Image: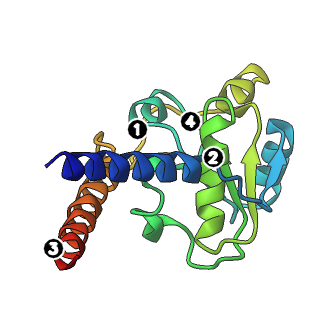
């Protein structure tokens, strides 16, 4: 029985370390970081540019860049159908300060989009520069508040542990 407990602890420790290591992996991205000034210039020049606000729906409704579509950065993959059909379409991703938008830009790029820009300093700097914004509107996507990704990872980890443990039990009975 003690061998079984030790095996479970070892398996759990291994999976925890594997998960933590995967979070630390650095991926190279080719999206472009741009200033709010450059973002405004592009928006003014190109009416087809797609503006993606990756903040929460509450933040979005409090104020956002005109023509922006709101998809919380956590749910970009789930709501990818709201992104442009053409992968070459210019996309400017922003949040309040440029941190969540960097994650969002990586996710959009991972979906195959090739002309993605991350607006550094975000919406706060946009407002500081006195650029126009709108409050409310119906382009907000209300997204769930549960972090489905974390729940999925925990469930998968438990299933893997159960299977691994069952295989170890079968091997120990053969010996």
- Residue at label 2? 24
Q: Secondary structure at mark 4?
A: loop
2 or 3: tag closer to the N-terminus:
2
Between circles 4 and 3, the one closer to the viewer is: 3
Q: Nearer the viewer, residue 49 or 58?
A: 58
Q: Residue furthest front?
A: 175
Between circles 2 and 3, the one closer to the viewer is: 3
In the rendering, at what x and y percent does residue 26 appear? 71, 53
4 or 3: tag closer to the N-terminus:
4
Q: Residue furthest top?
A: 128
- Residue at label 3? 173
Q: Please indicate whether residue 134 sits to the left or right of residue 81 in the image.
A: right
Q: Secondary structure at mark 1?
A: helix
Between circles 1 and 3, the one closer to the viewer is: 3
Question: Alpha carbon of mark 2 to alpha carbon of mark 4: how far?
Answer: 32 Å
Q: Residues within 10 Å of mark 1 (few under 14, many from 20)?
A: some
Between circles 1 and 2, the one closer to the viewer is: 2
């Amino acid at each position: 029985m003690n061998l079984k407990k030790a095996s479970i602890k070892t398996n759990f420790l291994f999976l925890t370390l594997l998960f933590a290591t995967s979070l630390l992996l650095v991926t190279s991205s080719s999206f472009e970081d741009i200033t709010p000034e450059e973002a405004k210039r592009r928006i003014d020049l190109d009416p087809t540019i797609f503006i993606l606000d990756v903040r929460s729906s509450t933040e979005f409704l409090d104020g956002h860049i005109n023509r922006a579509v709101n998809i919380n950065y956590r749910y970009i993959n789930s709501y990818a159908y709201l992104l442009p059909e053409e992968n070459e379409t210019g996309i400017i991703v922003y949040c309040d300060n440029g941190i969540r938008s960097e994650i969002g830009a990586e996710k959009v790029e991972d979906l195959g989009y090739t002309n993605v820009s991350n607006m550094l300093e975000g919406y706060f700097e946009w407002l500081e520069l006195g650029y126009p914004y709108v409050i409310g509107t119906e382009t907000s996507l209300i997204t769930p508040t549960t972090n489905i990704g974390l729940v999925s990872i925990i469930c998968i980890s438990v299933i893997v542990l159960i299977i691994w443990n069952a295989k170890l039990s079968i091997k120990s009975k053969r010996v």
